[in-house]
Amino acid sequence: MSQHSRKKLTSGKKVILGVGALAASGLAVGLLVTPSATAGGTGAAEALEQSKAAAADASAAKAAAPRTLAASAADATVVSGITVDGGNSARVGTTNTQTITVKWTIDGGSKLYGSSASIWRGTDRDSGLKQFFNSEQFKADTDPCVKSGDLTYSCTATFKIDPQAYLKNEDAGAWKIALHAITDAATDVDTDNAKTWYLKRWSRLSNNAAPEPVAKGKTITITGKLERANWDTHKYAGYTQQTVRLQERSLTGSYATTSSHITGTGSLAGVEKQTRTATTDRCYRYKFEGTSTTPPVTATGDCVDVR
C-alpha cells in the first residue's frame, strides 16, 4: 500500500499528505487541477512555488497527526545516497528527450508524510533562479518513495528534459537538487541544495587509423574528431582546444596512453591527427577525459594490419 498520496488543499498547489494524517486532521480531499510547470522563466518560478507548497503542506499534515511512539524515538529525518543517473552527472544530446533519474534514501521515521526532489540551476533558488524542473512523479501525483525497512524509504524521481524546448549552452554545468523529506521524526529535511550535480552536453569521438592494411615501415595516420551537443543550434559541433589522449595496444593487449594532444580550431574544430610508423599489427584509439560541461568519451579502437 502506498505510504502517502498527493492531493489538493486550498492553495491549488501540488501537496503531499500522509494518509493517516488526512484521517486525523479531517481535511477534505479534492482532485489536483493545476498542472506543474517545469522550466524556464515564469514556468520555473511556478514550479518552484508548487514544490514549496508540497513541502509546506506535508509539514502541516505532520503537525495535525497524532504523535506516535516510533516518532518520539526518532531524533531526525536523514536523507542519504543521492545519485543522478547512478552518479553525479547526466548528459543530454541535441534532439531526443532524455530521462534523468534521481534516487535517494530516507531514514529516521516510521511514517512518511511527503518527499520529492526537484532539479534547478541558478545562484539562488528565490532571486537567482534560471531553471527549475519538478519530477514526472510530482506532476502525475504518484509516489516517489516505497518503504524498504521499518524506518527506511527508497525514493526515485525521473525528469524528462527536451533539449530543444528547455536547454541552451549556458545551462551546461553545475545544477542543484532541492529536496524535502517529512517524516514523523522530530526534525525534517527541506533543503535547496541536497546535492550539486552536473548537466552535460553529450559528447562523441570518432577514430580512424589508415591505411589498412599497410606495409611495414610506412606511415599510419590516426584521425579523430571530438564533438559535443550544441543546445543553441541543436547540432553537434567540434569541441576545440581540448586534451585528447592517443592510446595504443597490441592485438591481444590492453590500451595505454602514448601521447596527449589538443584538438584543433577553426575549420579543424575538434579534429586531432597523429602519425605512427607501421612496425607490427596494432590498435589505436582516442580518449577524452571530460570537463564540467561535457562527459568523457572513448572512441572505438581501430586495428591496423601490418604486412
Image (spheres, rainbow, N blue to C red):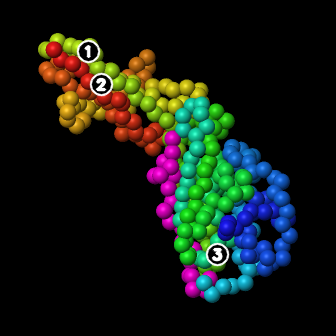
What amino acid does circle 1 point to? Glu
Where in the figure is residue 95, as x and y percent of width and height? Answer: 60, 31
Return the disc, 1 or 3, that comes first in the chain's sequence.
3
Q: Nearer the viewer, residue 86 or 44?
A: 86
Specify few, some or many for label 2: CA neighbours under 10 Å numbering under 14, 14-19, or 20 or more. some
Residue indicated by mark 3:
111
Q: Toward which corner of the image does residue 231 lie, by quadrant?
A: top right
Where in the figure is residue 187, as x and y percent of width and height? Answer: 61, 77
From mark 1 to mark 3, how far is it between C-alphas? 66 Å
Question: Can residue 261 be seen?
Answer: no
Q: Which mark is residue 302?
A: 2
Where in the figure is residue 147, as x and y percent of width and height? Answer: 59, 68
231 horizontally vs 61: left or right = left
Residue at left offset 79%, top offset 76%: 23
Disc 2 and disc 1 in contact, CB within 8 angstroms: yes
Residue at left offset 64%, top offset 64%: 115
What amino acid does circle 2 point to? Asp
Residue at left offset 86%, top offset 70%: 28
Return the disc, 3 or 2, that comes first in the chain's sequence.
3
Q: Quadrant of the N terminus?
A: bottom right
Q: Is residue 187 magenta?
A: no
Q: Which mark is residue 149?
A: none
Above or below, 301 against 137 in this view is: above
What amino acid does circle 3 point to? Lys
Instruction: Write down the region rendered in magenta.
Output: 71-91
Disc 1 and disc 3 in contact, CB within 8 angstroms: no
Q: Which mark is residue 212?
A: 1
Specify few, some or many for label 3: CA neighbours under 10 Å numbering under 14, 14-19, or 20 or more. many
Residue at left offset 83%, top offset 54%: 33
